[in-house]
Amino acid sequence: MAKKITIIGGGYAGIMLAKQLEAHADITLIEPRDKWVHNVAMIRALARPELLDEIVMPYDGLLQKGKLCRGRAVAIDGTMTILENGTTISGDKVIVATGSNYALPFKMQNDDSAAFVSQAKKVMAQIDKAQSIAIVGAGAVGCELAGELAFARPEKQVTLLSADARLLPAFPVKLGRIMARQLGELGVKLRLGERIEKLKKTDQPFVPTKGQIKLADGFPIAADLVIPVVGAKPVTDLLQPLETVEFNPQGRVMVDNWLRPTANPDLFVVGDIAATGDMMTIIALTRQVNWLVKALKADLRGRPIVNMKPYKPWSKPMILLPLGPDKGASALPIGVTGPFLTRAIKGKTLFIPRYKRELGWTD
């Protein structure tokens, strides 16, 4: 009889794990949302709204042998998962891949894809009307958004603000310099080393709003639209009640060398919630997924996971940062590269055809 593997969370890591393991085990993928959203492409969709229909995809075609269970996991007891409605799902192994939350409109704020699409369209309408746009936060998403807007909507004045003195300080200096130069070529105004005092009192966290922003020194910056772009927050509610689970200062789950958060040898975590030393990027979680798939396949054949080589994160932080379809830069194993490789790997298609195939979705 095939071993049972329960995967909790149908984001990037969850769908890749389910797809790659369903031929080797009895897979159950638990996901409360009715559709999958290609969040990476949402950045460009804000500048090119016609993409929205291509990046919100049904789960129906994802699995051929595995089972998709629409529901929300609320507890884990050993290798049994308990859903919100009281249903229990037993398994031989459990993988938690609940991902992270992010600001609207980059990620869904609830389980309703129709509500997400409606909210995204409202922000797109705000962008369409605005002549000046201020993006608060110059991390990867903020830089990409500034570049995508400036490329697709050159008539708009885009300002990118960051408290950091240079772009992308977690990455090599060269990457920040290349990005700053290309953003300048696209007409983006950079305000680095600038701390924001506060947004308007009527503003809500994580929501694009109208009106000016004020710097910590009191200097106001007027904008027709202010888009806060804040850091991702790992979704670890399911793991917090478990004994011996520990979290790092960023709220990610501490794991051993085999991506396990507790003494339970059959419980794994992967992706944005796992404190592996990797950053929260598609490149990082793909590395984790590939390692875990290989390890679990070996385990299913009778080789204990602890006899496998331990997981090792990237020795250097990796990222792909397109600025529209033709510009951008990346930090890769071979070093920092410019537009050519960035366009070829990500910038041209944003992996949209890949994920359409992954989810078995055709127009």
Image (cartoon, rainbow, N blue to C red):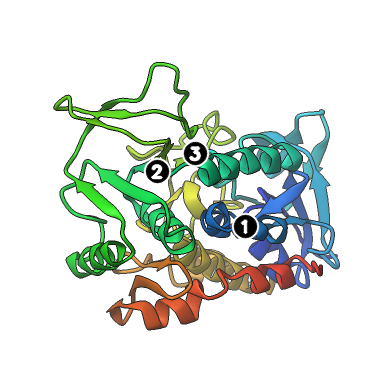
> Helix, strand, or loop for circle 2?
strand
Nearest the viewer among 325 and 106 is 325
Q: Earlier in the sequence, mark 3 or mark 1?
A: 1
* Residue designated by label 2: 133
Write the residue at 79% across / 69% down: 360
Answer above or below: position of 136 versus 63: above
Q: Earlier in the sequence, mark 3 or mark 2?
A: 3
Disc 3 residue type?
Answer: Ala
Q: Dividing the image into 4 quarters, which one contains the C terminus?
A: bottom right
Write the residue at 69% across / 45% down: 79
* Residue designated by label 1: 38
Disc 1 residue type?
Answer: His
Disc 2 residue type?
Answer: Ile
Rate crowding at label 1 as few (under 14), some (14 to 19) or many (20 or more) other CA atoms within 10 Å.
Answer: many
Answer above or below: position of 196 versus 164: above
Write the residue at 59% across / 42% down: 125
